Structure formats: structure tokens, C-alpha cells
Image: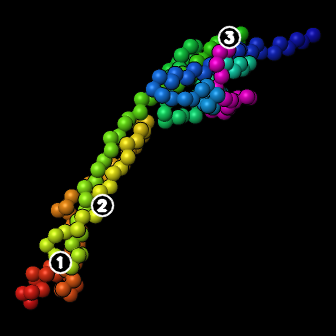
């Protein structure tokens, strides 16, 4: 008589904790958690994050990787029986916990930017330049790791082109047109 005993499974609890100390509003279920074996999601993964006792998986003894879909407004870390990268080694009969913690990042407040007026001298060659309106760019709050593109301020001394209506457009400055 041959008796085959199936391998003993291990139990893995994946708990999700969210810390909102800087104005974040996410909750555990906003994060999708993956549990992978040999680079492939196991049955039931991915799943929305869950508070204790967490999402419970009965798995074969092996090495697993717990991960999540990143959110730029939160940092991610692991505690419990998994290492700092979410790796966990499960033996037959183990009952282990891996906690994924997300902490909101402080926002960077970008102060308002005032772009000085740009002057137009197309008012007939008069001696008083005509200012164009000043642009005010509103204050905004962005995550600390976000890329922020700031406009370049244009000063009155930066003229791209000045066309004087009383001279032909020859491509030469007006003083060169007068001397030729």
C-alpha cells in the first residue's frame, strides 16, 4: 500500500497599512497588492489592500515576493516576516505576516510666479513702449517627487524681434538700412 501525503501548505497574511500624516486620503483598498511566486501572480493576486488580518493565502512552501502598484503620493515599506523588498521564504506549516506600509509624502508648495510684462514696440515707433499684461501663475501643491516645470520669466530687455513700420523688412537692423 502506497500512501501519498500532499505537501503541507504555508499560510501568508498580507496586511496593508496607510499612514496619512501629510494630508493624504488613501485607504488600504486603494492599493493593489501582488503576491508572486517565480515572477507570476499566485491565485487570488493581485488583490486590493486589506487591514489586519489582511488577505490570507494558503501557498506551497517556496520564496514569494509581495509588491504593489506604486503611487507617487506615497512611500512604500515592508515589515513583519518579509524583508525590506517584500521577499518572504515560507516553509511547510508556516503562518507568516507581511505588512505593506504606505506613508503619504509631504507636498511641495510652489510659490506663485509673476512673469514681468513684455513690451511691444509695434505702436508706430513711438518712444513709449506698450506693456502687455502681467501673467500671474497660481500657487499649486505637488508631491515632493513630482517633476515641476517652471516658466522662464521674460524681462523687458529680451526682445525676439522689433519691426519698425517705416522701414522695409530687409533682415538687417534699421541702422544698416539707412547706411546702405
Taking 87 as reference, is 40 left or right? right
Calculate the distance from the C-alpha at mark 3 to the C-alpha at mark 2: 68 Å
Stretch in magenta: 38-53
Direction right: furthest residue? 1
Is the N terminus in the top left, top right, bottom left or bottom right quadrant?
Answer: top right
- Give the label, 3 or 2, closer to the camera: 2
Please indicate, yes or no, whether residue 85 appears anywhere in the rendered image: no
Calculate the distance from the C-alpha at mark 1 to the C-alpha at mark 3: 84 Å
Determine the secondary structure under disc 2.
loop
Find residue 166 and report its horizontal and vertical position in percent. Answer: 18, 86
Residue 65 numbered mark, or none: none
Instruction: Name the image quarter holding residue 90.
Output: top right
Find residue 22 and report its horizontal and vertical position in percent. Answer: 45, 26
In primary-sequence order, the first of circles 3 and 2 is: 3
Is the C terminus in the top left, top right, bottom left or bottom right quadrant?
Answer: bottom left
Find residue 51 and report its horizontal and vertical position in percent. Answer: 64, 19
Check disc 2 and report the residue beneath it: 133
Check disc 3 and report the residue beneath it: 95
Structural crowding at the residue carrying mark 1, measured as other residues with C-alpha within 10 Å and reported as few (<14), some (14–19) or many (≥20)? some
Is residue 41 a member of the stretch shown in magenta?
yes
In primary-sequence order, the first of circles 1 and 3 is: 3
Determine the secondary structure under disc 3.
strand
In the image, 123 versus 18, the foreground residue is 123
Location of residue 86 with respect to 145 vertically, above or below: above
Amino acid at each position: 500500500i502506497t500512501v501519498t501525503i500532499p505537501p503541507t501548505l504555508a499560510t501568508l497574511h498580507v496586511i496593508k497599512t496607510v499612514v496619512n500624516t501629510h494630508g493624504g486620503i488613501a485607504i488600504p483598498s486603494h492599493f493593489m497588492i501582488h503576491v508572486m511566486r517565480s515572477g507570476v501572480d499566485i491565485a487570488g493576486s493581485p488583490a486590493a489592500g486589506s487591514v489586519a488580518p489582511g488577505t490570507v493565502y494558503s501557498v506551497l512552501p517556496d520564496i514569494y515576493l509581495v509588491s504593489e502598484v506604486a503611487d507617487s503620493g506615497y512611500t512604500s515599506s515592508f515589515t513583519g516576516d518579509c524583508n525590506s523588498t517584500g521577499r518572504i521564504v515560507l516553509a511547510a506549516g508556516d503562518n507568516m505576516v507581511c505588512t505593506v506600509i504606505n506613508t503619504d509624502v509631504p507636498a511641495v508648495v510652489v510659490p506663485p510666479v509673476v512673469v514681468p510684462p513684455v513690451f511691444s514696440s509695434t505702436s508706430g515707433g513711438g518712444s513709449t513702449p506698450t506693456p502687455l499684461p502681467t501673467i500671474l501663475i497660481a500657487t499649486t501643491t505637488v508631491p515632493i517627487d513630482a517633476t515641476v516645470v517652471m516658466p522662464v520669466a521674460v524681462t523687458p530687455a529680451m526682445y525676439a524681434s522689433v519691426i519698425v513700420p517705416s522701414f522695409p523688412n530687409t533682415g538687417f537692423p534699421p541702422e544698416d538700412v539707412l547706411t546702405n
